[in-house]
Amino acid sequence: MIVAGEGRGAAADRVEPGHDPSGGSRPTAAGAATRPLPQSPATAAAGFGAAPPERPDIAVTLRGRGRSRIEERMVVAALFLCTAVSVLTTVGIVVVLVREAAGFFLEVSPIEFFTGTRWTPLFRPQSFGVLPLLAGSFLVAIGAAVIALPVGLASAIYLSEYAPARVRRIVKPALEILAGIPTVVYGYFALTFITPLLREIWPQTNVFNAASASIVVGIMIIPMVSSLSEDAMSAVPRSLREGAYALGATKFEVATRTVVPAALSGIIASFLLALSRAIGETMAVAIAAGSTPNLTLNPLESIQTMTAYIVQISLGEAPYGSIEYRTIFAVGLTLFLITLLMNLVSAAVLKRFREVYE
Amino acid sequence: MKRPATGANRGVGGVSGGAAGVGRGGAAPGNFRPRLRYRRTLGFVFAAACFAATLVGLISLAVLLVDVWGDGADALSWRFITSFPSRIASRAGILPALVGSLWVLVLTAVFSFPIGVGTAIWLEEYAPRNRLTRLIQINISNLAGVPSIVYGILGLAVFVRAVALGRSVISGSLTLTLLILPVIIIAAQEAIRAVPNSIRMGALALGATRWQTIRHQVLPIAMPGILTGTILALSRAVGEAAPLLLVGAVAFVPFLPKSPTDSFTVLPIQIYNWISRPQGEFHALAAAGIIVLLVVLLVLNAAAILLRNRYSKRLQ
């Protein structure tokens, strides 16, 4: 890995300056700098009377150019190793999930896993149908989306089209705070504030229910929708808005028929990212939604999401290597694939349907 | 309530002038009905709705904070902060969780900062513009979207089992390092990208090597942005509970962790433990714990802002 890294880094160093057609963000003089002409640095230093702190470096460069070239290579290798960590993280996630899930699927057929409607790995007779967990995750995520998407989009429209600059400067960071509050706090809020409120309205509501989890997850992802959508809307050029005004449109028409359609790719991407975040959300749903795998559409009942199930098993000390332990990985793999798919689709939407303005 | 109303009025007023112009010119085709009153009303209702939606987020935040404060302020005391957890609610404290969180915070910072910044430097300054680099970049943004609990599964399988670090502070910190690494990398990349290219050119023209240019010119200018991004990422790590539950941070720790290989707990997990008990007095403890956690986060964020201001002043 080290050798490969160094080779690649060094190659990049040599090849790149000449072959970089854009050259925009990249110092094209780099090649010259690593192999400076014998005289030029000295003249440059003398001619400009470089600032005092710069002098020692230049002296070092002049005295030991061989040494600094070795140093340069070591630095590149070290930096590449850093980059390798994030690549290895992905590889690690995939390998760990797939290997352990494969062990699970040797004992439980994938057909039973993906079509079974009962999830009782902790009781006898065990059954491993993931549908109740999937349904739980989607019930919470869709409930959250029902709250967060309209509210987030409307906030984005307000911030981008209506709010005076001063209001925006205060409101935007305040909304970001919502995104920075730990999810366990949202869980507490759901259990001790939202659920009692729901029980006032619908007395049959379970202590643990999907609705309160949906509401707090929705609140949690509002800032994500609003800030990403607002970025997209702010990027719509002023000339489009002015064109619409010139045709006699009201502000409302400009916002809904010009700005929103022009920013649609960014808005949809933000929706998908927020939805994927809601599906992956763990602590709030583990606290508020309960731990009864339940194939239901009723948000007032107790359910269990994929993430909450993983938490439950990790608290229960399932013996290492047992089938119960392996369910974590099978469910984790399912969760990983779903969120990955949504993130990829979101990126694709952004790339494919982006309106480009000069 | 006053400000947005004036904003909406201004908007409607501005447009009515334009629409009136169209009417006067007689350019409208015969079946054109301006329906100005209807459109203005609609616009006003819409503006009010958008403003109300913005308030939903802000009011939720306020209600949440007031609710937590109301539940937890009474349980909050110096004794609470300096005591160990207990089965008796009135004697329970949060000290091991607080110390555990600080351990995790420091170790995660030590691991994640150099790796994250190193990656950002490589990607911005050294990486060739080819398919591999693009793939690495896409990979990093995807990692940022992976649910935190999946990192917990990774940490459980790799750090706790395979490397056999056990259910220790260091396993937890390494797991959180992987979790926040993408966030740090992306923030650092943005900061490095924002450094004007002329500075690099100047340094290179003076004969500095690439690395000297980066270390002495680019990094100092990018540092405020990098530090802010890192601290914000760390504050996310402090609030995480799910991955640490998998890595095995236990809720009942009757001692303080003294080395990275000790077992530990952190604030969010202690809070979770108290929430999941049915007795009301433990819920008050959870609320008090949440106040402590929010104060820690507030301090971190204030530090981020202070650091940024100080650095950018010195550079000017």
Image (tube, coloured by chain):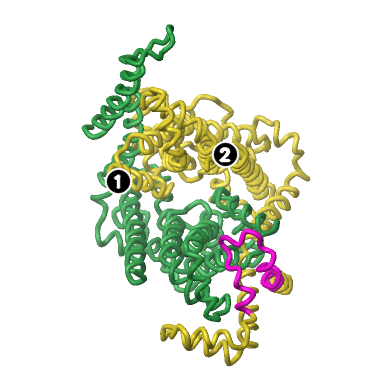
Chain colours: A yellow, B green
Q: Position of residue B177 (x, y in %)?
A: 53, 62
Asked whether the viewer can see residue A210, the reply is: no
Q: Chain of mark 2?
A: A
Label 1: few (<14), some (14–19) or many (≥20) C-alpha neighbours in 10 Å: few
Task: Choose top left, top right, bottom left or bottom right for residue B68.
Answer: top left
Marks 2 and 1 close (CB-CB < 8 Å): no
| A14 drawn magenta | yes
Tag 2 residue:
A354
In the image, residue A212 above or below residue A16: above
In the picture, which quadrant includes the C terminus of chain B? bottom left
Task: Say which residue appears at 28% left-offset and 42% top-offset.
Answer: A167
Q: Position of residue A312 (x, y in %)?
A: 54, 46
Report the residue that reaches farthest toward the left: B2
**Of the residues shown, which amino acid type is indicated by label 1?**
Ile
Report the residue that reaches farthest toward the bottom: A63
Tag 1 residue:
A170
* Magenta-tinted stretch: A9-34
- Main SS of the magenta segment? helix
Would you say B39 lies left or right of B79 here? right
Judged from the image, the secondary structure of the residue bearing numbered disc 1 is: helix
In the image, residue A234 above or below residue B176: above
Task: Say which residue appears at 45% left-offset and 43% top-offset.
Answer: A231
Q: Nearer the viewer, residue A193 or A263?
A: A263
Q: Position of residue A144 (x, y in %)?
A: 47, 33
Q: Nearer the viewer, residue A168 or A207?
A: A168
Label 2: few (<14), some (14–19) or many (≥20) C-alpha neighbours in 10 Å: some
Q: Chain of mark 1?
A: A
